[in-house]
Image: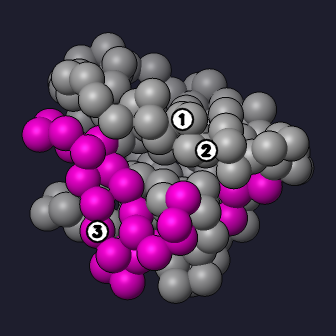
Amino acid sequence: MESQPKLRVNDWVGVLGRYIAENSSGKFAYGVRDCCLFSAGAVKALTGVDVMADVHYSNARGAVREIRRFGGVDEAVRSVMSKAGFEEVHPLTAHRGDVVVADIPKPAAGIVSTDGWYAIFITPTGIGRVPLSHCRLAWRVG
């Protein structure tokens, strides 16, 4: 049974800005600081919902195993977001803080930036930004 997502927290714009700032530097590490955990962390900061509660891995091998279990990044993100009750929307209608998927160059989960025009991703080389128009999938958060 799908649960209903919580509304965004008060001052969600400030929360989102602080979350992005706090996560804009640091070393990429699967299971600690990667694209899926970055996106899921934003959802939790904005709504209190832990969409990754049932997904566990601590290294690249574990991340690949989980992604394969779901059938790929698209299906992994779709599964955890829909299970938590978040609605899939067209990427060009995504708002600040919504979760998105884009190919950068491989499929990756990210969030819509505070300006609403870009999506932000955690990559092995740091923070990546792409125009929202490059995103293929999106989910409304809160």
Give the number of the disc on residue 130. Answer: 3
Q: Is residue 11 magenta?
A: no
Q: Position of residue 74 (x, y in %)?
A: 40, 60
Residue matched to label 2: 16
Q: CA distance from mark 3 to mark 2?
A: 18 Å
Dot placed on the residue nearer the N-terminal end, 1 or 3: 1
Residue 27 vertical position relative to residue 72 in the rendered view, above or below: above
Question: Given the image, on which type of amino acid does mark 3 rest?
Answer: Val
Q: CA distance from mark 1 to mark 3?
A: 18 Å
Question: Given the image, on which type of amino acid does mark 2 rest?
Answer: Leu
- Neighbour tally class for label 1: few under 14, some 14-19, many 20 plus, Cα within 10 Å: some
In this picture, residue 53 sits left or right of residue 130: right
Query: In the picture, which quadrant includes the C terminus?
Result: bottom right
Q: Is residue 127 magenta?
A: yes
C-beta proximity under 8 Å, tags 3 and 2: no
Q: Which residues are magenta?
A: 114-142
**In which image quadrant can residue 41 be found?**
top right
Q: Position of residue 79 (x, y in %)?
A: 57, 52
